[in-house]
Structures are given as C-alpha cells and as structure tokens.
Image (spheres, coloured by chain):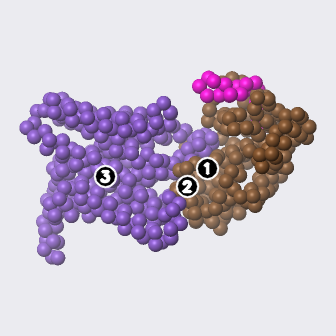
Chain colours: A purple, B brown
Amino acid sequence: MSEIFDKLQMYLSMPFVRYAIIVGVLIALCSSLLGVTLVLKRFSFVGDGLSHVAFGAMCVAQVVGLSKNMFIIMPVTIIAAILLLRVGQNTKVKGDAAIAMVSVAALAFGYLIVNLFANSANVSGDVCSSLFGSYSILTLKPEEVWTCVILSVLVVLFFILFYNRIFAITFDEGFSRAVGVKAGLHNLIIAIVIAVIIVLAMNLVGSLLISALIVFPALSAMRLFNSFKTVTIVSAIFSVVCAVTGLFAAILLGTPVGATIVAVDVILFAICFVIGIFKGGFKIAKAS
Amino acid sequence: MSLITVNNLTLGYNSTPILTDLNFSVEEGDYLCIVGENGSGKSTLMRTLLHLQKPLGGTIVFGDGLKQNEIGYLPQQTSIQKDFPASVYEIVLSGCQSRLGWRLFYNRSDKELARRNMERMNVLSLAKRSFRELSGGQQQRVLLARALCSTQKVLLLDEPISGLDPKVTAEMYELISTLNEEGITIIVISHDIGAALTYSKHILHLGKETFFGTKKGYLSSPLGKLFVSQSKEDK
C-alpha cells in the first residue's frame, strides 16, 4: 500500500501531473453541470455530434499548420452547436438526424483531409490520439492550463448565476416563453457554453469519449436523487471524483487516460443503478 | 374595456390559415371554455394568446392594465417531465420567473408567494417530494400552483384534465371554479363538453362554424345542440 502512495507522491511532485489533475477536475466539473440539462432535454447526443465537429476542425487546423488550433476549433464548434440546437426545434431536418449527419460528415472529412495533406509520419497515431485522448493531457503547457482555468471559471459562474433560469427552461420551455422569458437567448448561450466545454474536454478524453463525461454523472445522480439541485450538485461531485480516480488509475496502471476515466464513470453508474433499484423499488426504475 | 379583445384574428402555420375572422372578448372574472374537434385550432389559439406564435392577421388587445407576462399558463405535460428530477417546491418557485426581471435569484417575497400558492392548491405537504413520483392529479395541482405564481388575473388551461380519472377530474374542476370565484379569469380548452357546460360562463366553439356567446345561447344554438348530442354518443 505504502508503495502506491510513494509512487503517487512522486508523480504529484511533477508539474505536468499536477496540471493534468487541475484540468481534469475542471473539465469534469463543467461537463457534468451542463450534462444534467442536456440529458433532461433529450440532447445527450449533441455532445457526441459536436465533438466530432471539433475533431474535423482540429484536422483542418493541423493541416493548415496553425500553432494555436484553438482559434479554429472553438468558433467552428460554437457555430455547429448553435445550428444543431436550433435545428432540434425546427422541423425540416429532425434533431437526431441532423446530429448524425453532421457528426459523421465531420469525422469523415477530418480523417480524409489529414490523410491527404499529412505532414506527419504517423497519421493513424495522431488520429487515434485525438479520438481517444491519449496522453496529451499529460503534456499540457502552462498557458493551456490557464486557458482551461479561465474558461472553466466562466462556465461555472454562468451556471450558478443563471441556475434558476436554466432550471425553468429545462423543465418547461413553453411555460417560460409564455410568461415572457427569452428562452431562445438562453438556449443560444447554453449552446455556446456546451461547445466551449467540448473543445476543452477533447484534451482530456478525446473526441469519441466526450459524451461519457456529459451523460454518465448526470444519469448516475438521477438514479439516486429527486430534486434538480441535489442532482446537479451530486453529478458534479461524481464527475470530479471519477475524473481524479481515473487519472490516478491511468497513471499507476499505465492505461489510456480518457478511456480509464470513462470506465470509472461507467462503473459508478452501474453501482448507482443497482442502489436505485433497491432504494426506490422497481417503481422508479419503471417510470424512467 | 374587456380584459382580452380578439379582433378579426386569423390563425395558422406557415401562412396556411386554420381559422379566419375570429372575434371574441373575455371580461374580468369570466370563465370561458374553448371547445371544438381536434385540429380545429384550439391549441393554436392558445399559443397565439400566449404570444408563443404570431397571428396571420387581426389583433389581440389586452385591456384593464393586463400585461403579457401576467397570464398564468397550465400547459399540457411534456414527455420530458415524466422522469424529470425536480422537487415540487422547485417547480412551483419557477412560476416566479417572470417576476425576476434582471434579478438572478428568487427573493423572500417570491418564496413566500410560492409557499402561499402551494398552500392554496393543497400541495404544501408535498413540497419536498419529487414531481415524477406524484399522481396525475397531484402533478396538475403543482403545475396550477406554478401558474398562480405568475398571475393574479388570468389563467389559461390547456386540457387540464387529460389523463385524470373521473373523481380527480371532478376535484380539478371544483378547484378551477373556486379560483374563478376568487376573481381569477379562467380560459380553458377542453374536450370535455359536459364539464364545459357545467362550469363555464361563456363558450367559444371552433370549427367550420364558430360560435361565441353565453352558455345558454350555445345550448339553444343549432351548432351547440349538434355538438352536445355528438359528444354524448361518443361516450
């Protein structure tokens, strides 16, 4: 046991491990906050779709050779987020079809472009690392950490300040509109915030696994708790705990970071699911 | 001046009109029941009254100092709400969102208003319970308490009794008419013509022919007679 602690202590003394933990905790926190809203509004797949768009944008940025590829990825993802959440409400293309179309198209074109104009020797390695997160979280530079800290603080602040409105619009958008709340504006801001979170989370778990960070903590908390406030707080706690546990496990076992974190999230969900059945009887399990 | 006056209103989607030249008015303290077959434009009318949708023509005028955000609304329940983790108190309090203005958080008077309305709808004892675990009738009373937080004057109810059993339906109608006696103007959409005729003061019938007038007038009109007898056969 003490051997493990010694090993952890050694790792914790290295700045890049500390950076990884800071960024991991912040991303987990942000994604779980918005996750509750997305799951409840039946937008779970928006995260997935957007992360593929972000992957496509990143491929383009790589090929063009931009050193700060955040400047391409962020705007593209934000625009996609706005379009997807808007389309979800208008009816020509149904929400789920639109998400499927955009995400697969972005994935395909991203990979195509990287292959055609590759300037690195190891294309499949690069692609694999941006899809599954690889070890890029352990190679963060201080300025990337600061960007992440600032954006995360903004996201958390937004969520706290607009908590009451977010709840009202999530629960019943029609009612909110009827009593004169500008629900469209709020949806727009929520879309932008989601895009920001997804671009941040690409560093941590890679673009294929982002949905897990958004969906699992919220679903786990919803098994056990009944008020919106508790569900939100608990899902944030779950998410952070899973991220830290996953990071340490990945470091100690030498497994891929993103996949390990997601695996911990899945295990926690399974535990919550079982507890939920025992706690509420089969009634809740059936109702949901 | 009437509370709500509707002049030559044309309703529809994407410039295809469903209803044309609709005229009616709602007085303070009125109890108006809107009836008609499916697809006759009842819900479209309600959405237009709530400014969720623009009319294709004509006007809706609010009188007596009624503001848009002073209309209380009991919508039909959505599928999202069936497994939504939210406590009764959280939901009722969200009825105060129109009072927030530029404020970010609810203040003491908002919370007091939510508490009073929960008491009024007899759901105060459920305050900490989860909405998704309540019975249909309890859920409707919670949503009614929420609607009351956003209005002192007018309530619009969209099929308030759909999915409720007969006993709970009767209780719901009693509750609504108590609110009406307390001075709140009621506008209700309903399939249930029997109840409409028991409780309402005015009837608006939408369809190929429209009728607007008092309950008595409706019962003696050919349209009213036909619709009432048809509804009885359906049952």
Same chain? Circles 3 and 2: no
What chain does mark 2 sit on? B
Q: Chain of mark 1?
A: B
Tell me the amino acid under the disc marked 1: Gln
Q: Give the percent coordinates (x, y) of residue A85.
A: 44, 38
- Disc 1, SS: loop
Foreground: B167 or B96? B167
Q: CA distance from mark 1 to mark 3?
A: 34 Å
What residue is shown at x 65% (from left), y 53% (from top)?
Answer: B143
In the image, what residue occupies the spot 78% across and 57% down? B170
| Vertical placement of residue B105 versus A124, above or below | below
Magenta stretch: give its range: B3-21
Q: Are marks 1 and 3 in contact (CB under 8 Å)?
A: no
Q: Magenta includes B203?
A: no
Mark 1 neighbour density, 10 Å: few (under 14) some (14–19) many (20 or more): some
Task: Give the residue pinned by disc 3.
Answer: A27
Identified by mark 2, the residue type is: Lys
User: Which of the numbered marks, if any, corresponds to residue B77?
Assistant: 1
Look at discs 3 and 2 and give the one toward the viewer.
2
On the same chain, marks 1 and 3? The answer is no
Q: Amino acid at mark 3?
A: Ile
Q: Which mark, residue B116? A: none
Q: Nearer the viewer, residue A198 or B12?
A: B12
What is the magenta segment's predominant secondary structure? Answer: strand
A252 left or right, relative to A78: left
Task: Note whether A82 is above or below B164 in the view shown.
Answer: above
Residue count near mark 2 (Cα–Cα under 10 Å), binned few <14, some 14–19, many ≥20: few
Question: Which residue has dot 2 on it?
Answer: B82
